[in-house]
């Protein structure tokens, strides 16, 4: 395959060096911007991201980002309420498609929030600008847990299903449509703490003084989130990411009690009805838990930037794909710097079973031209 030099992207090398990694041989890397040889189509019936997640042969790592950029902020000014934006079908579709229309990523994620199901579980909440989530009646007793209802997605969040169905038609299988849910411990953290927290003292007090109460709540969330994933898949999601943002506040032994069993329950339940649905697990700050994350049974583990990709890949083992993990702050650097970091991440991830992403969402204020460069370089990669 020929690689055409593009003088406007002077820092892009023509090779990715895999020689420092076991069982990898050097392959070629080509920049976009000039004419390049047409890549060989491999299993074109499925989006690239799905093939990578399933460990199939792909020509390059698929790429997507976890948050909207650019014109999303303008839309926020017009519709300041987050719940309005995330619970109105037209707005959900418009916001979800913004990155697709501008950057053509390999994954298009539903615009929503992990707390969206709470109202349908009899847990009133709101998301207030500048304050974040507010749970009006925090759950801290057995009686409180009793009042929590099992989630019925088609009754409580029909707009999610409608939006996913529209997204599948709009994207037309040129990229994978991704749904997402919150993990049980992370959801429990919000509803017990009453919102965001720095020290997680309330949920830890509950965990260590009345563990049966917390386990009852976690069981309800696990059952409900499994149903929510199945619902999203039935309505059009081709992969689903599970966010366990706060599980990394737990020590490894407590993760094994209060998070791992419920993640595994979700995965086992979903795989019984949707065995081919790729499930991605993202837990920021997970460096101390990496070996435990594949025990959940997910297909892909998403790493944040505090973990060296080569080390993360080694610690995860060969049976799970990896996602990530460029530092979002890199996008404030020069184009040459961004290019170097992308190449370094992909080289360390090795060939295949890698989905390129940031280690977290895009930071507000990130230059949009740097986001465009990120995608240009990423989509020009070839193994």
Image (tube, rainbow, N blue to C red):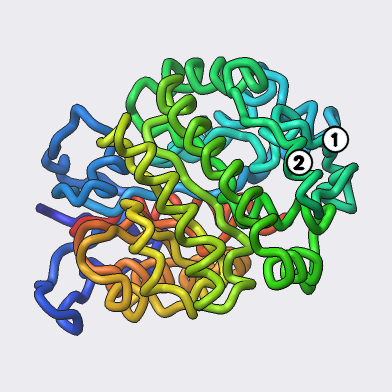
Find out whether the residues at labels 2 and 1 contact each other: C-beta distance under 8 Å: yes
Marking on residue 194: none
Marking on residue 77: 1
| Residue denoted by label 2 | 73
Q: Residue at x 83, y 35 (%)?
A: 124
Q: Nearer the viewer, residue 301 or 169?
A: 301
Q: Secondary structure at mark 1?
A: helix
Give residue 271's quadrant in the image: top left
Q: Residue at x 26, y 36 (%)?
A: 275
Q: Secondary structure at mark 2?
A: helix
Residue 366 drawn above or below residue 165: below
Left or right: residue 3 compared with residue 334: left
Left or right: residue 160 compared with residue 281: right
Note whether residue 356 is visible: yes
Residue 116 drawn above or below residue 208: above
Image quarter (top left, top right, bottom left or bottom right) of the C terminus: bottom left
User: Badge 1: few (under 14), some or many (20 or more) residues near its Cα, within 10 Å?
Assistant: few
Q: Percent x, y for residue 69? A: 64, 45
């Amino acid at each position: 395959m020929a690689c055409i030099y593009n003088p406007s992207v002077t820092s892009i090398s023509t090779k990715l060096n895999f020689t420092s990694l076991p069982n990898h041989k050097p392959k070629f890397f080509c920049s976009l911007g000039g004419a390049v040889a047409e890549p060989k189509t491999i299993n074109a019936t499925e989006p690239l991201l799905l093939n990578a997640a399933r460990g199939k042969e792909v020509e390059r790592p698929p790429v997507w980002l976890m948050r909207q950029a650019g014109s999303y902020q303008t839309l926020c000014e017009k519709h300041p309420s987050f719940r309005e934006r995330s619970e109105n079908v037209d707005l959900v579709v418009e916001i979800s498609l913004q990155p697709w229309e501008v950057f053509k990523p390999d994954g298009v994620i539903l615009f929503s929030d992990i707390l969206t199901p709470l109202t349908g579980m009899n847990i009133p909440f709101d998301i207030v600008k500048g304050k974040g989530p507010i749970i009006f009646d925090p759950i801290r007793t057995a009686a409180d847990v009793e009042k929590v209802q099992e989630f019925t997605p088609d009754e409580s969040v029909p707009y999610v299903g409608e939006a996913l169905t529209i997204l599948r038609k709009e994207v037309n299988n040129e990229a994978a449509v991704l749904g997402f849910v919150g993990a049980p411990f992370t959801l429990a953290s919000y509803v017990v703490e009453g919102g965001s927290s720095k020290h997680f003292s309330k949920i830890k007090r509950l965990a260590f003084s009345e563990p049966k109460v917390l386990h009852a709540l976690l069981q309800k969330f696990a059952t409900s989130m499994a149903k929510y994933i199945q619902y999203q898949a039935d309505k059009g999601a081709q992969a689903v990411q599970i966010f366990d943002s706060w599980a990394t506040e737990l020590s490894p032994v407590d993760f094994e009690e209060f998070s791992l069993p419920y993640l595994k329950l979700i995965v086992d339940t979903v795989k019984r009805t949707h065995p081919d649905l790729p499930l991605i697990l993202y837990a920021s700050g997970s460096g101390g838990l990496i070996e435990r994350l594949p025990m959940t049974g997910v297909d892909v583990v998403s790493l944040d930037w505090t973990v060296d990709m080569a080390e993360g890949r080694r610690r995860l083992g060969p049976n799970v794909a990896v996602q990530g993990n460029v530092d979002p702050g890199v996008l404030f650097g020069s184009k040459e710097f961004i290019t170097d970091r992308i190449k370094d991440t992909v080289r360390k991830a090795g060939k295949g079973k890698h989905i390129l992403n940031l280690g977290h969402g895009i930071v507000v204020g990130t230059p949009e031209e740097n986001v465009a460069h990120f995608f240009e370089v990423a989509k020009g990669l070839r193994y």
